[in-house]
């Protein structure tokens, strides 16, 4: 299945938006600012969920079966997530003051590695690698979609129905265990929106032919609508989901010309997973070490440099860890050659 380069670029935009959100929240907390000036960056997570729904529906081939689907998903997300989880475990054991509410026990390690959410001492439902809460939703969605592959070409419709059923259960019984509230959270609707967007993309040739003018208008509409809704009605799942759907639609319409700049943007999109997972810790380190000793403008400058370095580190991780591990895990085992003893 052909990679949609414009969506890879959007992956970087979404990841960098989350970076900006944590950039702003870190400064706001450390220096007691009245707001996070990059609050809209949090919607990068919503973009990721809509993107995931679209990409899984777009790229999955039911004929290859559940095993291939599971291997591909595991190869994509598990190696880096496990590596960084163990890094955070090591930090928690050696220098726990660098972390906030991370408590390392055998139970929390096992749950984190298996993408099972749990409630931390601060009340947040997160694994050890705290942004892994989004991966818990991703893996849950993969399990649902993988189970629906038995329905062949109708897998997307059955997966959508299953997710909507879970959300309906949440509306009927909103109270329950941490796991119940997590796995029936209405935010799951964003995976459905992504899958439905793929159905629209497949059905309408005008959607696939693309238009940079239409793309620009949709992106402007997305940002304007989100700003208007949040300003007059406050943040909501509706506002974030609408922004995400319109942005993904706009980037689907975008046509990226061949060239070095666009190749770099696609590369950054490929590295967005690394960027997303590592940036909270690279940004947190200078804040923890320097925040109480240096002025806000000086630390802001340091964080800008750290952010650029983090993007570079994410590309290095992509080339020298993510891609090699994916290739290793997706490698087909060589068939065992049977030797026939010579007769006579």
Image: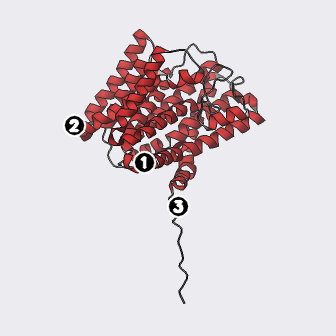
Q: Position of residue 164 (x, y in %)?
A: 40, 25
Q: Residue furthest front?
A: 344
Q: In which quadrant is the C terminus drawn?
A: bottom right
Identity of the residue furthest to the right in this view:
94
Dot 2: element: helix
Relative vertical location of residue 15 with respect to residue 291 in this rendering, above or below: below
Circles 1, 3 touching at the beta carbon (< 8 Å): no
- Under tag 1, what secondary structure? helix
Task: Identify the element where label 3 is drawn.
Answer: loop
**Residue nearest the viewer, comparing 319 with 106:** 106
Which residue carries the number 1 mark? 65
**Which residue corresponds to mark 3?**
333
Q: x and y percent of residue 276 in the render?
A: 54, 35
Q: CA distance from mark 1 to mark 2?
A: 31 Å
- Disc 3 packing (10 Å; few <14; some 14–19; many ≥20): few
Could you give the CA–CA distance between mark 1 and mark 3, rounded to whole angstroms? 17 Å
Does residue 5 show up?
no
Image position, residue 43 (x, y; %): 46, 25
Question: Residue 206, labelled with which disc?
Answer: 2
């Amino acid at each position: 299945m052909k990679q949609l380069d414009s969506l890879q670029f959007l992956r970087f935009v979404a990841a960098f938006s989350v970076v900006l959100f944590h950039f702003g929240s870190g400064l706001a907390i450390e220096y007691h600012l009245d707001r996070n000036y990059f609050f809209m960056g949090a919607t990068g997570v919503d973009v990721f969920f809509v993107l995931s729904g679209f990409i899984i529906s777009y790229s999955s081939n039911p004929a290859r079966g559940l095993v291939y689907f599971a291997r591909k998903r595991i190869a994509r997300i598990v190696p880096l997530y496990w590596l960084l989880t163990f890094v955070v475990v090591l930090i928690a054991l050696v220098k726990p003051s660098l972390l906030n509410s991370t408590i390392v026990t055998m139970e929390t390690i096992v749950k984190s590695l298996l993408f099972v959410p749990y409630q931390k001492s601060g009340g947040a439902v997160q694994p050890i690698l705290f942004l892994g809460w989004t991966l818990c939703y991703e893996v849950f969605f993969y399990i649902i979609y993988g189970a629906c592959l038995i329905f062949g070409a109708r897998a997307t419709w059955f997966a959508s129905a299953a997710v909507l059923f879970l959300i309906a259960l949440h509306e009927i019984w909103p109270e329950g265990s941490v796991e119940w509230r997590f796995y029936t959270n209405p935010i799951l609707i964003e995976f459905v929106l992504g899958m439905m967007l793929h159905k629209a993309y497949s059905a309408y040739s005008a959607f696939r032919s693309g238009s940079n003018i239409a793309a620009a208008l949709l992106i402007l509409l997305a940002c304007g609508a989100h700003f208007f809704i949040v300003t007059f009605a406050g943040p909501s799942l509706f506002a974030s989901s609408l922004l995400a759907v319109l942005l993904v639609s706009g980037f689907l319409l975008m046509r990226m010309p061949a060239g070095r700049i666009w190749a770099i943007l696609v590369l950054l999109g490929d590295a967005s997973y690394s960027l997303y997972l590592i940036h909270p810790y690279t940004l947190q380190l200078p804040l923890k070490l320097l925040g109480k000793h240096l002025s806000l403008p000086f630390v802001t400058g340091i964080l800008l440099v750290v952010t650029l370095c983090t993007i570079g580190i994410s590309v290095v991780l992509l080339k020298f860890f993510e891609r090699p591990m994916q290739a290793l895990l997706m490698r087909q085992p060589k068939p065992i050659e049977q030797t026939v003893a010579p007769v006579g």
